[in-house]
Amino acid sequence: MIRLIALASYVYQSAAAIALIFAISHLLPPADYTNFSLALASSQLLCVLMFEWLQLAGLRFLAAAKGDDAARLRWSLFAAGLLSAVALVAVGGTASRLSTLAPGVVVLGLAVAVLQGMTDMYFMVIRLSDRLGASAVLMILRASILLAGAVAGAALYRTAEATLLGIASGQAFGFVAGLIAHRAPVLRVRWRTMLADWANFCRYGMLAAGASVIHLSVPVLFRFIVIGRLGATGAGAGFSIALDLLQRPFWVLNAAIHTVSYPEVVADFEHGTDQQARQSTARMFDFMICTTLVMLGGLIGFVPDAGRILVPQEGLDSFLAVAPAVAAFYFLHIHLQATLAVIPHLNKLATWLVMVATGQLALVAVASAIATATGVSPSGAVAGAAIATAIIILFASRPTIRFGAVPRWTLAIEATAAAVLIGSFSAFPSQSMIWLIGKIVIAGIATLLIAWRGDFLMPRRRD
């Protein structure tokens, strides 16, 4: 039941993020929304740059630690987090001199990055303290406050600055709520011990986080290349809405699955037999492959209906034209970044992760630049980025194939059939509310059938 609540918390966060994007796109003028989108994307990049290494190190080391060892690692983790926050402000402040964004937008973007990084790290610590339910409730609470704060700022002042201030306030509220809800035990250690912990964090976390930063840079770079051609226009806003809207469901679903399944995978890998490690890892692959397949079908099938209802008219045509290609790109991107990275993370093959991420960035950058220079449409440019990512996926699959954690391919085929069924709804526009509700019901039934067949929330696969 707690696993279901945890998964529901991520679904809620995804829904809240989608609602926020649609609401902000209506409340802000196109130019302000474009600036808000660029600032938020840059903020996420900085957050990953400075905090992702600690998130990855915490997940890898804390998941297998108990008692005093866990308390010691928490102390070292929090101390490193404070240093990362200082470094983020210094790096971000220096980089902002090259930006064309207003100073107020830059300052608020940095505040969002720091607050999000610290809050995510503390929520992760709560989760790894066997408080999965508490962390799920806190994430729901934070998502609600983020949505309310951002919408209130945009509605009252209709500027990117006010909207970012609302998001920063929501992150700060979430951090304080986490401190009140759970005081994670810590054990103060000597300076030498803390330095030794930091060295372990760095050896694994820095390179692994570098790979995450490079992966995150792919859509950010792609965004700047295409927006540089479209400009702060309705078409540019529609393209930005598609990128903002369609990355969130995949990212949130991946985070949910890792929260529910990854600690068990780490524990089996470190303390169980090889068979147990392969079994729990294969089960995680089942979860990730099947749910993202169904989600891809849902996005392709229902985003046109949602776009016609919620996207501003000046950006609607651009949004509808590019949305299917963007959904396909993010589907491939999340599996390259997350699914195919599980085995390298378990084996601490951080250098391999960096090689894969660098290859993707290089291929996508070349494909995007060529597409933009030759006048290809934004949807064609996105398709080129998706093809480049698929090529890298073929290269990155080798460690996973060698490990031998085989997912249930019959279940994946069934999920593919469900995704095709749901995605086909895009060819049948909803002429009436009754037909729209009917499509939602059919999609819901197909999704429930896949969830029932997969039995994803059980701790172990049923043989």
Image: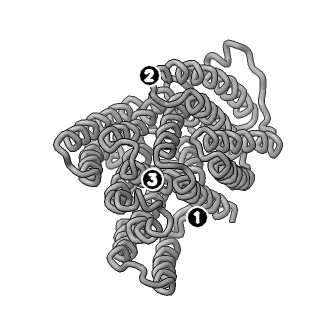
In depth, the one of 60 and 298 nearer the eye is 298
The residue tagged 3 is: 241
Distance (Cα) linking label 1 and label 3: 32 Å
User: Farthest right residue?
Assistant: 180
Could you tell me which secondary element the residue under label 3 belongs to? helix
Alpha-carbon neighbours of circle 1 within 10 Å: few (<14), some, or many (≥20)? Answer: many
The residue tagged 2 is: 98
Distance (Cα) linking label 1 and label 2: 47 Å
Instruction: Locate residue 414: give its quadrant.
Output: bottom left
**Which sits earlier in the primary sequence, circle 1 or circle 3?**
3
The residue tagged 1 is: 457
The kind of residue tagged 1 is: Leu
In depth, the one of 260 and 361 nearer the eye is 361
Instruction: Locate residue 117: give its quadrant.
Output: top right
Could you tell me which secondary element the residue under label 2 belongs to? helix
Taking 361 as reference, is 16 left or right? right
Asked if residue 83 can be seen in this view, the reply is: yes
The kind of residue tagged 3 is: Ile
**Which sits earlier in the primary sequence, circle 1 or circle 2?**
2
Q: Nearer the viewer, mark 1 or mark 2?
A: 2
In depth, the one of 100 and 286 nearer the eye is 100
